[in-house]
Image: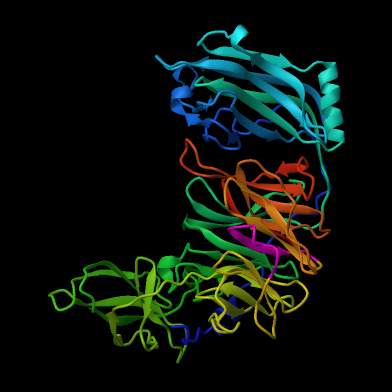
Amino acid sequence: MLRHSLILLLWALAWAQDAGFELPEPGKGQTIALEDAELVRNGDFAFGAGAWSLQGGLSTTSTDAALHGAPDEGAYLLGSSLMGTHAAAMQEIYLPQRVDAARLRCSWRLHVDPGVQASLGGFSVVLAVWNGEQWQTLATLCSVDAQSYPGADWQHSALELDAAGLEALNLARKEGRRCILWAQLESDMVVASLDAISLRVDGQRVVPALSGCLAWTASDAHGKLRVGVVNPDGSGARVLWQAARESASLGLAWRPDGQALVFSSDHELAWSAFNHDIYQLDAGGVRRLTNAPSLAWLEAQDLPTGVVEVELRNLTGQNQALVGVYVQGALKPAFVSLAPYGMEGSEQTVRLDVCDLGLGVGQYVCARIAGRSLFAANTVDVEPGKEVVHAGGLGIAQLASYSPSSPSFRFDGAELCCTLAGLARLPAEGGVPETDAFGGVYGFDPVWSPRDERLLYCDTDFKIRLWQAEGEPRLLPGFDGYTMVGEPSWLPDASGFVCSLSASPHGNVLYCDLDGGPPTPVTDVFNERLGSPCVSPDGQYIACVRILPSGALGREQRELWVMRGGQPGEAWRLPVEGDCWQVAWRP
């Protein structure tokens, strides 16, 4: 399959360079005035557990706990059968630099199932900060024990911080201390239900000016892929390109000169030999680097067409209910159903109108079934306006799935690496991925060093390896205690890298120095995962996708954030609508 040549000259030369690839003016930092801003993530439990870290007892979410039967989910904390066991729900609060007013509220109830012997040690909801050795309570929203048990009805607590509380909160923020909202239950068989938890503040959030801009991929409400940019301070957000149909992305990277982006997308999977293809977005718009030309390019041209005839034979003993047939340059694929081998209807002939890509240019022919492909042995030379060109027979037997992902430019921008049946190389102008270019190494998430030929990738054991031009790939030490490590991303000076822990519940970002030493966590999140990490040009900040567990809405919540490495409280969300998938920091 991969031996077929892709003829690129026609559409590469014809690609206009006057389309928009407008990047934002550099951000200058922002001071954002907050007025009644909600700081509790997922305060109404619409995403179930969401950003809450639930520990001890049986801590979960349930529609049965919803306030007065409201449609949103509440959380409940159930003490275990061992007296004195703690059940807790906690969430980190990302404070602004200055808080002028803070209002806490929560609805809660304590109840016991009929016929159950229960006892209550205590229940409380507090706002607390870390003082370097332990959590210190700043404000108590509610606190009850057996002597002050209010009964099983819903209770509604509200509190506005006084001057002393605000001073303590601002001091904690100034000193870089972490702040959490904490609900805790100590009981035997008492159920604590929570709902409508909120912390609203007035104040100012100061976001620093950082160099470079961030590219991102995200899916809108209809599942259509978008590629956009935004400054690290949240200014200049804009969408550069959007797919016309439902689609997903498997990678994103800047060209080293910062004048182009590459990404993997399946928005044209019916018009390609692959499920995903690699695309480049630059001043000329979007063009396909693998299996070119793209449907968008063909539709923009006025090329002569000819008819290509393909004979299909089902060589399997199974019905093939929906077989797609595509010829490179066709504006529409053809679809047929094939009966099992040897039965009537196991052989069919289809015809496609195909654009002629040039005199003597061979165009590939393939069959597609459920995301898998089979290529004809020979290409076809389309003859516009003449008799039908016969592509020959195509026997449906074993098919393979091809989805090039995780594209990354070499430091000089001359070629890319990606994943396709192992690690592969791809010329920067596009073409056929060379799958044996790295010695047959199999892995995923490859990323080239910004300084030299070294390459990081993740092996099948989810460990990070370093590939160099000479010698065997080297397994980097220190990852024995970690599982599900991936998405490595180099530091700008190539002295080390960051990577993500995809295992729940605490999927943090790790830093690894290539000169030695074990990996070091540089983030500390609760009950969520951080994906697609990348490092700022000054090496101090990390941009990543924050992934909250799925809950009542049945899907994950994926957001774009910037945070300072080693400073858990220094983090802010960027204005990207929809579910964010990848982020890349412009060199």
Where residue 519 appears, x then y in whole percent? 73, 59
Q: Main secondary structure of the magenta part?
A: loop
* Side (left or right) of 349 relative to 357: left
Q: Quadrant of the C terminus?
A: bottom right
Q: Which residues are magenta?
A: 476-492
Q: Residue at x 78, y 74 (%)?
A: 451
| Relative to 37, residue 471 above or below | below
The quadrant in which residue 399 appears is bottom left
Q: How many marks?
A: 0
- Residue 479 part of the magenta segment: yes
Q: Residue at x 62, y 65 (%)?
A: 463
Q: Is residue 14 visible?
A: yes
Please state which of residues 224 and 160 is positioned toward the viewer in this rendering.
Answer: 160
The quadrant in which residue 461 appears is bottom right
Q: Quadrant of the N terminus?
A: bottom left
Where residue 309 appears, x then y in whole percent? 29, 82
* Side (left or right) of 339 relative to 24: left
The quadrant in which residue 196 appears is top right
Please state which of residues 111 and 139 is positioned toward the viewer in this rendering.
Answer: 111
* Side (left or right) of 258 relative to 310: right
